[in-house]
Amino acid sequence: MAISISVLVLIVGSKKISKNIPGALVAVIGTIVASSLFNLEAHGVHVLGEIPGGLPTIGLPNVHWEKDLVLKLLPTAFSMFVVILAQSAATSRAYAASYNERVNEDVDLIGLSLANFGAGVCGTFVANWSPTKTQMVVSAGGRSQLAQITTSLIVLFAVLFLTGPLAKMPNAALSAVVCLIGVELIDIKGMRKIWIQRPSEFWVALITALVVIFVGVHQGILLAMVLSLVEHVRRSYRSKNVIVVPDKTGGWRFLPVTAPEQVRPGLLVYGFAHTMYYANAQQLYEQVLDLTKRAQPPLVWFCIEASAVADVDFTAASTLRDLHGILREQGTRLVFCDVIDLVKTELDRYELTDLFGKDAFYGSINAVVSAYDKRSLP
C-alpha cells in the first residue's frame, strides 16, 4: 500500500507541477531502485520476477494440430476477435474525435491483422488498439507515429538489456500506474452529458460498463452491440414523422402528425422521417389512414415527402401497395416527392412505379403543389 500510494502521489504531483515531467517513468525507476537497494521482495513485496529476454523465435508453435484442439481454441479466438475489433474501433474513434482527425477503419484493420499475424508467429500476446496504452501515449504528449517508433525502440532495448532490473519492479507500482491510467479513462463529464442529452444511450453505456467490470470484456461488448441495435429499432419503430405546411416566409415548417393541416384544400404532405422497413411499416399504414380519415376537407392528393427514406424493404413495399389501393378506393391519389434515385430503383423492382404511375413522383414539394394547382386546368 505504501508503494502504491507513493507512486500515485508522485505521478499526480508531477502533473500538478508540469505536464512535461514524466512522473510515471520516475516512479517506476524509483521503485525499481528501492526494491533493489532494500531487497523489498524479502519483506513480502511481490515483484514482477523473471522476464524472458532476447529476441523472439519466429515460427508456428510446436504442437500437434488436431480437430479437437482447433474446436477448443475457436471460442476463445472468436472472443478475442470481437474484443479486438470493438475495442480498437472505439479507441480509434474516441481519440481521433478528440483531435478532430479522421479514422480510416480499413487501414486500422490491415494494421491489426498484420500485428496479430506477427504476434502469432512470435508467440506473443494478441495485439489491439489499447485504450490504456493509448492514454499513456497521449499523457506523455505523443501526437504522431514518432511516438510509436520511439516506443518500439525502447521496448527492443528493454527486452535485450533491461529484463534484469524490470524483474525487481514491485507489482504494486505497476498496478498503481495502470490504475491511474484507467481512472483517466473514466469520462464522468461525458457520461453526464449523455445523461442530459440522450438518457437512453446513457443506460446503454452504464450497463455495458458494469457488465465489463463484473462479468467480462467480450460479454460487455456483445451486450453493448445488442442493446445498441435494440435502441436503434426502438427509435425507428416509432419514427418521428411530420406534416409539412407552408410558413409565412414562403418556406416550409413541420407539424406533428396530430395536426393534419393541409398545404392546399385537399392536399396533405406527410413527411416520413426514417427508412421504411418492417419495424415501422405498421406505423406508416396507421398514420396514413388516420390522416386521411381526419382530413377536412376530404383529401384529393396524399403526398409522402420521402427525402429521409434511404431504403424500402419488402414489407414496407407491400404496405405502400395496400395504401395505394385503399386511397384509390376513397378517391385520393397517392403521390411522392423528394424520392432519391436508390429508392426509385427499389420501387421499380417492387413494380410500384408502374402501379403508382411515373407521374406520381415529383422533385420537390413546390412541384407537387404546382401540379396540384394545375390538375383541373384544361
Image: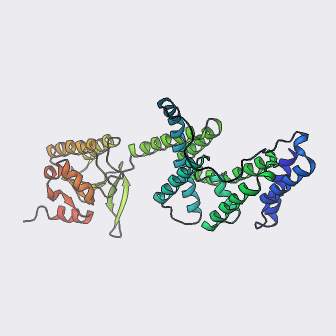
Q: Which residue is depicted at the point 34% across and 56% down? A: 308
Q: How is the image coloured?
A: rainbow
The foreground one among 320 and 152 is: 152
Q: Which residue is depicted at the point 73% across and 50% down? A: 178
In the image, is 205 to the left or to the right of 272?
right
Q: Point out residue 11 in the picture as x, y percentages from the top left corner.
A: 80, 57
In the image, is 365 to the left or to the right of 234?
left
Quarter of the image with the C terminus is: bottom left
Q: Is residue 97 visible?
A: yes
In the image, is 133 to the left or to the right of 233?
right
Q: Which residue is depicted at the point 50% across and 41% down? A: 227
Q: Which residue is depicted at the point 48% across and 40% down? A: 226
Quarter of the image with the N terminus is: top right
The foreground one among 142 and 290 is: 142
Q: Point out residue 357 in the picture as x, y percentages from the top left corner.
A: 14, 54
Q: Point out residue 290 in the picture as x, y percentages from the top left corner.
A: 29, 43
Instruction: Determine which quarter of the picture holds residue 214.
Output: top right
The foreground one among 210 and 271 is: 210
Instruction: Determine which quarter of the picture holds residue 317.
Output: top left
The foreground one among 267 and 340 is: 340
In the image, is 303 to the left or to the right of 21?
left
